[in-house]
Image (cartoon, helix red, strand yellow):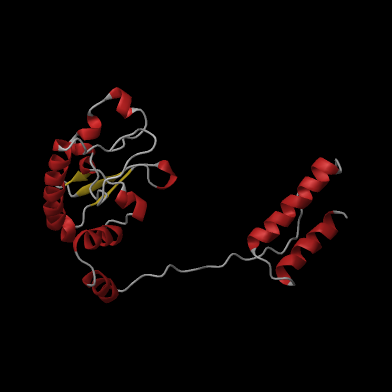
Amino acid sequence: MGEGEIARFLSSLASDSHVAASTQNQALNALLFLYREVLGKDIGYVNGVVRAKRPHRLPVVLTRQEVKALLGCLGGAEWMIATLLYGAGLRLMECMRLRVKDLDFTSNQIVVREGKGNKDRLTMLPAAVKEPLARHLNLVRRQHQRDLERGLGRVALPNALQRKYPNADKEWAWQWVFPASKHYMDRLTGMR
């Protein structure tokens, strides 16, 4: 096949077979690989290809009333988590990995660490959750103190911080905002 036949084949995938754009791209790359690596021929740029269209999907967004009704069904930590997901734009794991030091009540900001793409970013701390979150942290801090008295209250630290700061895993600033409700044994380090 020459360049014309390849162009017609790729166009027929889009217009006749109605394949997805990614399928058409995969077929093109397979043909380029076949010609270049197996047959040792360079076919160059394939002109005149009808491209498959990528679907344009609009995001589904809840109305204010729907959000209010949804949040109205929740309470406690679940309400705070859902409010942070919606109001601060956090992903679930970003919210679950929040540490006390990541919350800035003075500036109304949250530092999201190692978010999507392993990047850090700042986002806002929603006013609606500020006061309940402060009360929640007071309860968590008291629980942390009781855990420390029982020889617990340690948290996993990122990267090599445990070696650099041996006691940082017990410090309040490094504790999870939403800690686990039960203690468990860390299989790798033997931490409780």
Q: Quadrant of the N terminus?
A: bottom right
Residue 172 position, x and y percent, is: 17, 38
Residue drawn 75% across and 72% down? 16
Residue drawn 31% across and 50% down? 96
The answer to whether 73 is drawn above or below residue 77 in the figure is below
Label count reads 0
Residue 177 position, x and y percent, is: 22, 48
The answer to whether 71 is drawn above or below residue 30 in the figure is below
Which quadrant would residue 103 be assigned to in this image? top left
Residue drawn 62% across and 66% down? 53
Left or right side of 153 for 5:
right
The answer, for residue 43, to whether it is visible in the render is no
- Return the residue nearer the eye: 161 or 151: 151
Residue 126 position, x and y percent, is: 20, 57
Q: Quadrant of the C terminus?
A: top left
Question: Furthest-top residue in view?
Answer: 164
Which quadrant would residue 71 be assigned to in this image? bottom left
Residue 155 position, x and y percent, is: 27, 38
Residue drawn 25% across and 43% down? 99
Which quadrant would residue 13 be assigned to in this image? bottom right
- Return the residue nearer the eye: 75 or 62: 75
The answer, for residue 175, to whether it is visible in the render is yes
